[in-house]
């Protein structure tokens, strides 16, 4: 915390170490609740999180408990980008947008792309889709020279190309008077003494993932705060490639607390995870207890050795392409799944199949279902009459089979089952959906099996975890061993009950657990 006396500020952030499943975020939210209950004005509390979702979870919980208006009375529950955007009073028109990158590409004759969102001050983010843009951003987040960042990278583009784009990019932004999202942070850092309010209490979650630039911002905000708590777990620092500098968290001066009881991890998984954690160099030593359940750890050679017919499952690999064989196996077995946030059967397909079967039962369906059905039917007098392919309905309308036949050009009826009626549905989807129905899976249910990279599962958990130990060629050549230890530590600690470790076929491209 920060101690103020006679205009002098002595900073000392208080660290909260939250090993996996120990309830770190819950601890922070309880502290928010306690502070509000003690009479701290809500406008004097800041809760800074890495994701909008996490920030809003904290905000909405506090608002509900104390009957506050989330947006107006808890204005500082945000990401760092969102906080900068609000306090600097930046306008949407001042930010680089996708069309600006297109224009820049045309001006310099070099293909660039980036997708960004500035919906409002609460939804501020950018994703660089081009490796050079990513490198330029990384150098600034790390607060180091571009050439040094380039030399440390595995970028295929030449230094001349990188330097050329950098100079052109800077010149374009200056001429157009535009900011990108790292500009936003850099400007915020300069202006914090002027624009940032004094907080009674400030929380910063997932501190192990902060870049050097973000750490500078955090420390500047600390000077504006009476108490400042940073929470994280250095053993789960897996974003070094994105500029994160975990040593800042480890070496931070001030008091600390280690949450000592995991409510997720069973004994066998905990014992394995502890052995992996001990391989990590430069870590904050900490002990925490597993929950009072044995759990299991099983080593297997292939995904087909696991019966995934029941329960919740999380399947992880170091790289996304390693999950492709799993996708084929799950489809063969007729299991619904989610991969990187996307269902194995699209919402549109689900609406079409379920909608058609509802029509065959003489039930009314929504406009969205009818639209989905028509998207998978041939027009031109085959399934739908000519000129009737586009439905003339309002969003709130419902229709029956008879309505569609008499008014909207439908030429077929309940004599056709879904895979006959939806003639434009790809055959591969028809085969997969048939397998799903035969397996007894609920076709329109939330998938109980999730596939993801290990990076994509951070913060998640499942009763059953399948962890592939294969490493990509790049990981074996360029990745620091400590980074690999942390990555697989994160992977195995998503486990609530059963961990299945899939051993790699190629010993030279395997992480040894």
Image (tube, grey):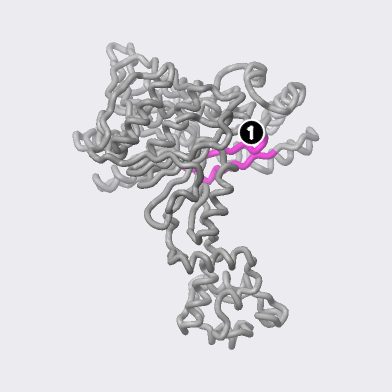
Which residue matches tag 1?
A: 178
- Residue in view at x 46 percent, y 26 percent: 485
Relative height, residue 117 to residue 19 (above, below): below
Residue 27 spot, x, y in % from top left: 27, 34
Q: The C terminus appears in which quarter of the rendering? A: top left
Relative to 71, does residue 363 appear above or below in the rendering? Answer: below
On screen, 185 above or below 313?
above
Main SS, magenta residues:
strand
Residue nearer the viewer, 391 or 475? 475
For the record, the magenta segment spans 113-130
Query: Horizontal placement of 296 versus 324: left or right?
Result: left
Q: Give the residue at x 46% y 20%.
A: 216
* Nearest the eye: 216 or 454: 454
Residue 445 appears in which quarter of the rendering? bottom left
Q: Would you say residue 19 is visible in this rendering?
A: yes
- Counting from the top left corner in percent of width and height, residue 511 is at 51, 30
Does residue 125 belong to the magenta stretch?
A: yes
Q: Nearer the viewer, residue 405 or 303?
A: 303
Q: How crowded is mark 1: few (under 14 residues within 10 Å), some or many (20 or more)?
A: some
Give x and y (percent) for residue 371. 57, 71
User: In the image, what residue occupies the spot 53% across and 83% down?
Assistant: 401
Indicate whether 336 appears above or below 63. Answer: below
* Near-viewer residue (446 or 332): 332
Residue 460 left/right relative to 266: right
For label 1, the SS is loop
């Amino acid at each position: 915390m920060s101690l103020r006396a006679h205009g002098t500020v002595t900073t000392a952030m208080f660290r909260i170490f939250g090993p996996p499943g120990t309830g770190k975020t819950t601890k922070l939210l309880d502290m928010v609740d306690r502070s509000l209950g003690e009479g701290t004005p809500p406008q004097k509390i800041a809760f800074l999180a890495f994701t909008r979702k996490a920030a809003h979870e904290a905000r909405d919980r506090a608002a509900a408990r104390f009957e506050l208006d989330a947006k107006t009375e808890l204005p500082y529950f945000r990401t760092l980008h969102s906080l900068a955007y609000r306090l600097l009073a930046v306008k949407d028109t001042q930010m680089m947008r996708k069309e600006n990158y297109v224009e820049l590409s045309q001006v310099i004759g070099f293909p660039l792309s980036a997708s960004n969102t500035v919906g409002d001050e609460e939804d501020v983010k950018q994703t660089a889709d081009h490796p050079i843009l990513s490198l330029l951003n990384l150098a600034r987040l790390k607060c180091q020279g571009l050439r040094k960042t380039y030399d440390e990278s595995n970028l295929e583009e030449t230094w001349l190309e990188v330097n050329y784009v950098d100079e052109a990019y800077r010149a374009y932004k200056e001429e157009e008077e535009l900011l990108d999202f790292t500009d936003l942070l850099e400007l915020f850092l300069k202006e914090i003494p002027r624009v940032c309010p004094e907080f009674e209490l400030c929380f910063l979650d997932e501190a192990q993932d902060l870049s050097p630039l973000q750490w500078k911002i955090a420390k500047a905000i600390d000077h504006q705060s009476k108490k400042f708590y940073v929470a994280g777990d250095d053993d789960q620092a897996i974003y070094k490639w994105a500029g994160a500098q975990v040593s800042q968290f480890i070496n931070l001066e001030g008091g600390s607390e280690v949450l000592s009881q995991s409510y997720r991890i069973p004994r066998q998984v905990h014992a394995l995870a502890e052995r992996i954690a001990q391989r990590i160099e430069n870590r904050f030593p900490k002990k925490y207890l597993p929950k009072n359940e044995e759990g299991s750890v099983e080593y297997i050679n292939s995904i087909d050795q696991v019966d995934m017919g029941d329960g919740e499952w999380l399947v992880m690999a170091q790289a996304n392409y390693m999950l492709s064989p799993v996708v084929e196996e799950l489809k063969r077995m007729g299991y619904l799944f989610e991969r990187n946030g996307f269902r194995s059967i699209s919402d549109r397909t689900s609406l079409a199949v379920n909608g058609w079967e509802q029509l065959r039962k003489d039930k009314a369906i929504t406009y969205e279902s009818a639209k989905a059905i028509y998207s998978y039917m041939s027009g031109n007098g085959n399934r739908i009459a000519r000129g009737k392919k586009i439905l003339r309905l309002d969003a709130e309308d419902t229709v029956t089979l008879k309505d569609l036949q008499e008014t909207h050009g439908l030429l077929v009826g309940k004599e056709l089952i879904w895979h006959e009626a939806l003639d434009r549905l790809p055959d591969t989807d028809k085969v997969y959906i048939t397998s799903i129905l035969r397996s007894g899976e609920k076709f329109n249910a939330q998938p109980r099996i999730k596939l993801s990279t290990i990076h994509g599962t951070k913060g998640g958990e499942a009763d059953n975890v399948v962890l592939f130990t294969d490493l990509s060629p790049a990981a074996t050549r360029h990745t620091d061993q400590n980074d690999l230890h942390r990555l697989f530590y994160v992977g195995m600690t998503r486990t609530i009950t059963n961990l299945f470790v899939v051993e790699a076929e190629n010993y030279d491209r395997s992480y040894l657990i």
